[in-house]
Image (tube, rainbow, N blue to C red):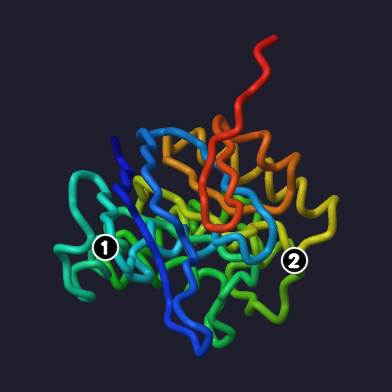
Amino acid sequence: MLIQTTQLQKQVNTSEGILHILQPIDLQIAAGETVAIVGASGSGKSTLLSLLAGLDLASSGDVIIDNVKLSDLDEEQRAKLRADKVGFIFQSFLLIPSLTALENVMLPAELAGRKDAEQQARELLAKVGLAERLQHYPNQLSGGEQQRVAIARAFVGTPKILFADEPTGNLDSVTGNKVEDLLFEMNQASGTTLVMVTHDAELAQRCQRVLRMDGGQLTEETRDVA
């Protein structure tokens, strides 16, 4: 399995006592799978995504990425694992305002020491239809264009895993549908494992598996067999 969790839990201390954000979760995701995590706001789905990506630490239990236990790594080692194997797409795009589209996409590859960073960034921006917008800054791009830059940035370095947190949440429905199509097309072409948090039921149904978070508990939705 590419991604595994065993008895994964997250809790925080509050003035009213211990708040259990995630109940014990056992999860397995195979290489190449597309998985949606759905649930109401506050159900714990973004927390789960952060733990899987090594952006946050569990209170107990383990996350294992490509046979590496995240709890065995320090922050620098977790950062290197993310740089080598993980791509991210966020609802708020998180582009760097002072960098052009090309520079934003190049940045993760440059930080990883890739010598072909610019060439790969140019190719990816062409794939997402922004070959003519390489030198534009984020404030010169529409929301849909900014998210396409973010998708190109996520695929730079050919990650094994792509984590997406509400990737179309800030887009209108027409633009969102176009970005969804692009995301799945690129994901299929690269064979990346996609793990996505979304409120959008239709978007979730495009994934092979749908996992539902409810009160910190994770269950898998069954699919109707035609």
Q: How many residues crowd around disc 1 within 10 Å: few (fewer than 14), some, or many (20 or more)?
A: some
Q: Earlier in the sequence, mark 1 or mark 2?
A: 1
In the rendering, at what x and y percent does residue 180 appear? 68, 46
In the rendering, at what x and y percent does residue 122 appear? 49, 58
Residue at x 30%, y 53% (from the top left corner) = 85
Corner quadrant of residue 164: bottom right
Identify whether 194 is placed above or below 49.
above
Q: How many residues crowd around disc 2 within 10 Å: few (fewer than 14), some, or many (20 or more)?
A: some
Quadrant location of the N terminus? top left
**Residue flagged by tag 2: what amino acid is it?**
Asn
Identify whether 142 is placed above or below 23.
below
Which element is circle 2 on?
loop
Identify whether 223 is placed above or below 132.
above
Which element is circle 1 on?
loop
The answer to which of 189 and 167 lies nearer the viewer is 167
Corner quadrant of residue 165: bottom right
In the rendering, at what x and y percent does residue 113 appear? 23, 68
> Residue 114 bears which disc, if any?
1
CA–CA distance in space, label 1 to label 2: 31 Å
**Residue flagged by tag 1: what amino acid is it?**
Arg
Residue annotated with mark 2: 170
> Residue 162 bears which disc, if any?
none
In the rendering, at what x and y percent does residue 206 appear? 66, 34
Quadrant location of the C terminus? top right
Residue at x 55%, y 33% (from the top left corner) = 209
Residue at x 40%, y 72% (from the top left corner) = 107
